[in-house]
Amino acid sequence: TSIVMYPADVIRAICMSNPGTGPVAAVNGFVGTHGMKGFVQQGLGAEITRASFSRMIKFWLQPQVHQAVYGRPQGKGNPVSKGVAGALATIPEVITISPLENMKLAEQLDKDKRFNGMADTAKHLTKTRGVVGGLYCGYIGMQMRQCLWTGGFFLSLDVFKGAVGTAVSSPLAQDVLSGFAAGAFGVALNCWTDVVRSVIQKDAIAATFTAPEA
């Protein structure tokens, strides 16, 4: 899904980091700089790695966190306990994915073609801003984003399953529709944090080319 949805992720990053820019203008600007091949080159490697670690960590840890915090399996929890466990499970997730998020965004917003892959991007960010400043820029915004999305997802999933179950009989369809609805609910909660952290990261990356390198 990371590969299929990546063009949308690129446009999201451009629009969020440049308030007022619409999707059409974002596509035209990106394709004008990188061509259509940019959608499979600019930051795709970082995104596939980030998404893989992100999903693996949070969905693996959430049931364990629920057991540790509440002393009972997730299956015996309620929407609030599941949501809290999900939010807490994002702490190690964001610590892991933050460097990849910064590298990905730098490549996505690279309108001057200054970066050449993940290694080159990481080298520039750490050289100009240090390891923490370069790879963990916007950490608070990313942590809030993941907490709100994952917490909102697990908080609402059973609620949506119950609502969908009254209208749809297929278990597969129930899972797909309720999962989509819970995901959309999470996005409604966290979208503003993604906008803020994208602007912060964009400005920080741009500043590395105007200030003398360390």
Image: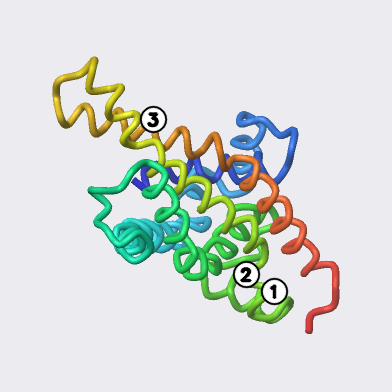
Indicate the secondary structure of the residue bearing disc 1. Answer: helix
The residue under label 2 is 136
| Label 3 environment density (alpha carbons within 10 Å; few <14, some 14–19, many ≥20) | some
Q: Amino acid at mark 1?
A: Gly
Q: Amino acid at mark 2?
A: Tyr
Mark earlier in primary sequence (2, 3): 2
Q: Nearer the viewer, mark 2 or mark 3?
A: 3
Q: Amino acid at mark 3?
A: Ala
- Image quarter where the C terminus lies is bottom right
User: Quick check: 208 above or below 147?
Assistant: below
| Circles 2 and 3: CB atoms closer than 8 Å | no
Color scheme of the displayed model:
rainbow
| Circles 1 and 3: CB atoms closer than 8 Å | no
Q: Nearer the viewer, residue 131 or 116?
A: 131
| Label 2 environment density (alpha carbons within 10 Å; few <14, some 14–19, many ≥20) | many
Disc ID at residue 133: 1
Q: Where does residue 89 sit, x and y in percent of width and height?
A: 42, 61
Alpha carbons under labels 2 and 1: distance apart:
6 Å
Q: Where does residue 195 sit, x and y in percent of width and height?
A: 66, 44
Alpha carbons under labels 2 and 3: distance apart:
31 Å
Residue 52 visible in rendering: no
Displayed quadrant of residue 44: bottom left
Q: Nearer the viewer, mark 1 or mark 3?
A: 3
Indicate the secondary structure of the residue bearing disc 2. Answer: loop
Q: Where does residue 212 sit, x and y in percent of width and height?
A: 85, 78
The residue under label 3 is 181
Q: Where does residue 177 sit, x and y in percent of width and height?
A: 30, 28
Mark earlier in primary sequence (1, 3): 1
| Label 1 environment density (alpha carbons within 10 Å; few <14, some 14–19, many ≥20) | some
Q: Nearer the viewer, residue 92 or 26?
A: 92
| Circles 2 and 1: CB atoms closer than 8 Å | yes
User: Residue, x 47% and y 33% (percent of image)?
Assistant: 185
